[in-house]
Amino acid sequence: MESSFEKGYDKIIYPDGSIELNFKTQRISAHSGSNFAGILMMALYPVSCAVTSPAMMPFYDSRSVRNEFPLGLVIFWNILAVALWLFSIWKFNNKKSSLTIKPSVGIIFDSNQLPFAEIQTITTLTETSSRNGKGTAYVCANANGRQVKITKYMSPELAETIATEIKNASGYSWS
């Protein structure tokens, strides 16, 4: 039976044995994202209102005695502005990433190369938000006394899966 659920990543195996993993990541973590969203809400909401106001002008009747927007139009305008704001946050935060694993050689990610011979461990680190308890994680490698961040932020489950794929495809035995 084949699963009806979509995988969190795509795996491409090339003829030379290298493996490319494509997956969705986030630019900011859950911890900084919860703080960042509050700041963006205050900063971008007026911008959203300014951008959506030309769409509302045809509905404004300047001959009105009270010379004000109808309440229903103001509510619709706010809904439109919030929708634009949410779309902007979603578009800014989500990103597609990829990394290439060359068995017995190393990992290529974000124009960087990391040989397996220099890696002691490959792990995931999770950061949680104190406000909502949601967490984001990333895959990192301990190499030459440094912690190298291999991926951007993603769900903890996807990070564990990507780390396992790297370990399995590396050709090395990890403890």
Image: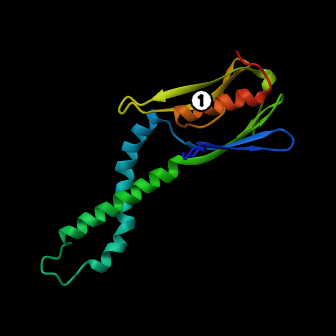
Q: Decide if residue 47 is in sight here.
A: no
Specify the quadrant that holds the N terminus: top right
Judge by depth and name the residue closer to the eye, 171 or 98: 171
Q: Please state the horizontal and vertical placement of residue 135, each as a whole percent of the image.
A: 46, 32
Label 1: which residue? 160
- Secondary element under disc 1, as helix, strand or loop, is helix
Question: Which image quadrant is residue 132 in?
Answer: top left
- Three-letter code, disc 1: Glu
- 32 relative to 150 in the view: left or right: left
Within 10 Å of disc 1 (Cα), the crowding (few <14, some 14-19, many 20+) is some
Identified at 53% across, 31% down, the residue is: 156
Identified at 70% across, 17% down, the residue is: 145
**Residue furthest bottom in the image:** 63
Above or below 90: residue 155:
above
Specify the quadrant that holds the C terminus: top right
Above or below 83: residue 68:
below
**Residue furthest right in the image:** 16
Judge by depth and name the residue closer to the eye, 52 or 114: 114
- 141 relative to 169 in the view: left or right: left
Above or below 92: residue 33:
above
Q: Please state the horizontal and vertical placement of residue 166, each as a whole percent of the image.
A: 71, 31
Judge by depth and name the residue closer to the eye, 153 or 51: 153
- 115 relative to 127 in the view: left or right: right
Q: Please state the horizontal and vertical placement of residue 122, each as a whole percent of the image.
A: 67, 23
Identified at 19% across, 72% down, the residue is: 70
